[in-house]
Image (cartoon, helix red, strand yellow):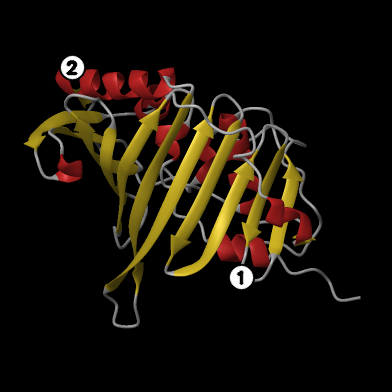
Amino acid sequence: MKASISAWLLAATLAMGATATLAQQPPPPAASMAPTPPKLGLKVELEPAAMALVKAMSDKLAAAKTMSFTAVTGYESPARTGEPLLYMTLSRVVLQRPDKLRVITLGDGPETEFYYDGKTAQAFEPAVNLVATAEAPNTIDAMLLAAYRHAAIYFPFTDVIVSDPMADLSKGLQIAFVVGKSRVVGGVPTDIVVLADQATHLQIWIGSDDKLPRMIRATYMNDPSRYRHTVELSSWKLDEAVPADAFTSPRLAGARKIPFARPDAPPPAKK
């Protein structure tokens, strides 16, 4: 949740420059993903009860060898009126630690599919039969950073799928407190915590019994409009068997291949 939502279509269809190999260079630290926000003068106030809830969630996620869940993401973007529009995506996620990930995404735009098998990362857009393919690092964490660096691909649920969510969420943390309880989100009792640093304000609903994240609401401090992003997480399955062919698709073989590139990369020079 500590970078902006990526545009899958843009990342794929504008990838027309030189091929980027995701494994060529060490990925940048997470802090380099976003511009440096203004200093807000926050004091460090970390409630032990809030940190205990976040650690319990992190431990539950980190211990899972496999996981699958559904993520419904809503994010705001400016309209011509100056007021925010709400865009929605639905991602079905399957993960196998330490080196396999599949994300099938529907949304207010084209369907996209992302596959990572420990060696190769592939982003596929079925509507135009295009696939961007690149060599990738051999862990999910390193692949996620490399994918952002080379193709601006970022998943809004990244903090949930990294190997150590606690380390990811607590880096630079300055504020942590418990808001209270809810029985609305996910149809289960949840504990609500707030985490904030100089860049991000997160509100997280954590299952009181199962310790799984049920919803995350983020506001980015360096966004002048302070637009909000919300991810609802459901249909959790942990440590269930995953088919060996889950991290690829036979449709990729017949797709037209293009290289990975950032959507903000300059267009190739005309010959």
Quadrant (top left, top right, bottom left, bottom right) of the N terminus: top left
The answer to whether 131 appears left or right of 227 in the picture is right
Question: Residue sitting at 16 percent across and 42 percent down?
Answer: 187
Q: Quadrant of residue 169?
A: top left
Near-viewer residue (243 or 183): 243
Report the residue at 74% width, 69% height from top: 267
What residue sits 38% from the left and 46% below the top? 70
Which disc, if any, is residue 145? none
On screen, 1 above or below 258? above
Say what secondary structure mark 2 lies in: helix
* Residue closer to the observer: 39 or 129: 129
**Residue 129 x %, y %:** 69, 66
**Mark 2 and mark 1 residues within 8 Å of each other at the beta carbon:** no
The vertical placement of 217 against 264, above or below, is: above
On the question of residue 122 being in view, the answer is yes
Q: Quick one: label 1, few (<14), some, or many (20+) residues within 10 Å?
A: few
Question: Residue 262 at what x, y percent from top left?
Answer: 65, 57
Q: Which quadrant of the structure image shows residue 81?
A: bottom left
Q: Secondary structure at mark 1?
A: loop
Other-residue count near label 2 (Cα within 10 Å), few / some / many at <14 / 14–19 / ≥20: few
Q: Nearer the viewer, mark 2 or mark 1?
A: 1
Number of the label disc, if any, that sits on residue 127: 1
According to the picture, the residue beneath numbered tag 2 turns out to be 48
Q: Amino acid at mark 1?
A: Ala
